[in-house]
Amino acid sequence: MSKLLIYIVAYERKSYTQGTIELAYKLKPKNSQIIVCDNGSTDGTREWLQENQEKYELGLIFPDQNLRVGGAWTLLTNYYKENDFDYILLLDNDGWILPKEENWYEQCLEVFNSDPKICSLGLHKERKPGTLGFGKQFDPNYNSKKSFNNLEYYDTTLFAAFRLDKFSIWYETMKNWPHKFIGDKLCNYYKLLGHRTLKIAPGFITDISEYNFDNKGHEEYNQWFFEKERDGKEGPAYIHNVSRSLDYENVKSFTVENFGEEYIKFL
């Protein structure tokens, strides 16, 4: 049986993190482990993780500073060897696995087994299929979808997190990863090595922040992220943007329909 590592990188947005972990634990396959790296949260996330570590059987990594996603992924390679797992599921702390997709892992394995060159599957289920950046950009590769069993997929390098990778290839790449962020850099590097990277359409994982952009913790996170990226450079001030979000009643309806009423508390 293949071994899976589920790796969640968290920063602030405690309620999102709680929902992400609850669903990952509920829907994880046998022979899998969940590791959470908290990038220096100050909103009680670390305390909650410690209090619930035994309940969710979590491994915890608490770096002294915010390493961003790229740094957090590289940090993980210090704790394992390249053959410790077969696959790694990489999530941000707003990546909610859809309960209706309880066989998500088995379906992914079937895709991997169809071609040894496939090393990564993007699993994000976008609000607008085939789009990026909250629907602002369309991936032209989406028009080349192919059918496989009960799924559709397309070759593309345009995805970052919410991905399932072959662990050994990911490990060797991330050991010396030079970038703070992932973007499409990782997929493009895999492609240079002769591998294929695909997106499943539709995917199995929802970015809950796409639907609930007005979450207070998420708003504070976005302002921090905006200012951090400016790094002291002059430019336009941060502007609160609610146009990306559904109104709260529709967010609640979406949550109940896709996850259950008990997940409203995590919005």
Image (tube, rainbow, N blue to C red):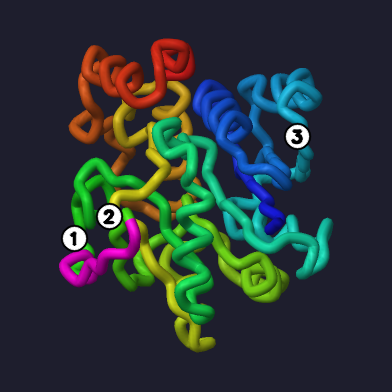
Question: Distance of mark 3 from mark 2, alpha carbons?
Answer: 31 Å
Q: What range of the chain is rendered magenta? A: 141-149
Residue 18 visible to an observer of this rendering: yes
Q: Residues within 10 Å of mark 3 (few under 14, many from 20)?
A: some
Q: Is residue 248 left or right of residue 105?
A: left
Q: Residues within 10 Å of mark 1 (few under 14, many from 20)?
A: some
Q: Which residue is mark 1?
A: 138
Where does residue 190 sit, x and y in percent of width and height? Answer: 51, 78
Please name which of the two marks, 3 or 2, marks the residue nearer to the observer: 3
Please name which of the two marks, 3 or 1, marks the residue nearer to the observer: 3
Q: Quadrant of residue 18?
A: top right
Query: Please, is residue 245 above or below residue 174 in the view?
Result: above
Tell me whether circle 1 and circle 2 mark residues in contact (CB < 8 Å).
yes
Q: Is residue 227 left or right of residue 238?
A: right
Nearer the N terminus, badge 1 or badge 2?
Answer: 2
Is disc 1 placed on a helix, strand or loop? strand
Q: Residue at x 38, y 71 (%)?
A: 157
Specify the amino acid type for callout 3.
Leu
Q: Quadrant of residue 52?
A: top right
Where does residue 252 sit, x and y in percent of width and height? Answer: 30, 15
Residue lying furthest front: 149
Q: Which residue is mark 2?
A: 132
Q: Quadrant of the N terminus?
A: bottom right
Q: Which residue is mark 3?
A: 58
